[in-house]
Amino acid sequence: MRGRQVFMESLLAHGVERIFGNPGTTESPLLDSLAAYPSIRYVTALQESIALCAASYYAQASGKAGVVSLHVAPGLGNAIGMLYGALRSGSPMVVTAGQQDTRLRLDSPVLGHDLVAMAAPVTKWSVQVERADEMAPILRRAFKVAHDGHPGPVFVALPIDVMEQETASQPAAPASLWRAPLPDPRGIAEIATLLLNAAKPVIVVGDDVARHGAVPDLVRFAETVGASVWCEGLKLHAAFPTSHPSARLGLPLDPASIAKALGDADLVLLLGGPFFEHVWHADAGPFPKGAKVVHIEPTAERLAHAIVPSIGLVGSLPHALAGLVETVTASGTADFRTSVTRRNAALADLKAKEIAVQKMRAEKAWDRDPISMPRVMAEIRAALPPKAIVVDESITASIDLARTLDFENPSDYYGARGGGIGQGIAGALGVAVAEPGRPVLCITGDGSAMYAIQSLWTAAHAGLPIVFVILANREYRILKHNIDVYRQKFEISSQEPYAHMDLGGPALGFVEMAAGMGVAGTRVTKPGDVADAIRRAFASGKPHVVEIAIEAKR
């Protein structure tokens, strides 16, 4: 058996159904082998970063490892930014790149470089297969490491001559590994005591709550203790139903603003996330003064890593939450139950007021020209078909999105982690491949879309009926907000205009770009046309771009 056959058979053994890639010469062994493995479909991208991002979102949406085929040093370099995003997202992936013939190692071959060193900083493990005999054990370990602890990408370099070497080594099926530890009962008891004595508990959730299937347990827990639920500022999943009375928004990205959002909480419970990703430094911490902090993680690697909690607990999130509900319910006094009822009623009242405020905000800007962001989100909500999935990279429109659209299940929503832009339009490809029976709506800005606009070609080529809503304000609006904050924080009195942050002259034409890649498009400039344009796009059963002209920063 040749190395390339061991490679393909190993993919089969690990249940791989898709390879996302951009082909090149050193990938010839892989590409030439695909015909013999029809159950593994190759999803072609026009640039490596798009293949990488699509595979990352595929991994998140399918629960399976994403497999990527890149092309030597420049191709891996193209994908590094999205590889960083996959690492921060915790996407289990096996990323490969064809490598030049090892016999050319000393000759500085065309496109040759140390791929392992390039990938190492943004992967959990980076390795090159040096002999065909190593192919099976390296791939078995690669899939294991990708799923171990906090999941993430692994990189494997595949020299073209090694792929053609003969070997007696056989592919190995993965072991049945059960990784979730039960939480220590002593930790459960300690945390329960804090909960029973807290007057205003607050929960902050990360993506692992959704990834580990703990959302139903979290809903019951929040209702049992009468706590509000916030999510991280940068999130990939909807880890709590957004319409629930306890649900609040995403937290800001600087410590002082986080502490302000959490208000007068006396107990902050952190569940399944890195906590916290900041943009701006602040001398104060992210927690209200005097608040107790509890940190619960499914693995030890992130427990108390960047924060110092009062109590930290490692364990399966569903079991930890169920254990806390059981202990608190059994130990709670009549006064505690009365307090919980009062807190839950207050949260329901706050939720109703927030919905009313957002409705008023939209009505106030209802007829604004260009279209206001609250109006756009209201129209999108009206046009969404049943069971639709939203892939969100709306950035400066994200608050209006969060206040307008409801996401009841983790699979209803995919955001972006890491801060790199372009993830939405490319990631929607992977979500659509993983969920072929559900409508997919991607919401992105014009600046973000241009980082991965070639994704439209892949959507057409693969027949993925994604509706791409591109919010066109002809600017990098988030950067304008950030320079305002920068000037304020560093006491800079500059009144200079925003340099190099406008995208007009010439204006970007997304309908025209889409047409050049085989995707139909609609340009919308009137608010009353938004919903109908989106409905017609979904009804077409094909990928479609809806470019919406929205208000710019004033």
Image (tube, helix red, strand yellow):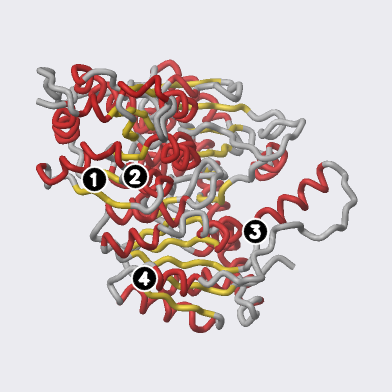
Vertical placement of 475 versus 57: above or below?
below
Q: In the displayed structure, does residue 477 sit left or right of residue 547?
A: right
Q: Are marks 1 and 3 in contact (CB under 8 Å)?
A: no
Which sits in the foreground, 208 or 334? 208
Question: Three-letter amino acid code at disc 3?
Answer: Tyr
Q: CA distance from mark 2 to mark 3?
A: 27 Å
Q: Earlier in the sequence, mark 1 or mark 3?
A: 1
Question: Three-letter amino acid code at disc 1?
Answer: Arg
Label 3 crowding class (10 Å Cα cut-off): few <14, some 14-19, many 20+?
many
At 67% from the left edge and 68% from the top edge, which residue is drawn?
552
Q: Are marks 1 and 2 in contact (CB under 8 Å)?
A: yes
Dot 3 corresponds to which residue?
Answer: 476
Vertical placement of 455 versus 117: above or below?
below
Q: Earlier in the sequence, mark 2 or mark 4?
A: 2
Which percent across, then down, holds residue 192? 48, 26
Label 1 crowding class (10 Å Cα cut-off): few <14, some 14-19, many 20+?
many
Dot 4 corresponds to which residue?
Answer: 519
Dot 2 corresponds to which residue?
Answer: 55
- Extreme residue toward the right, this view: 493
At 32% from the left edge and 43% from the top edge, which residue is drawn?
24
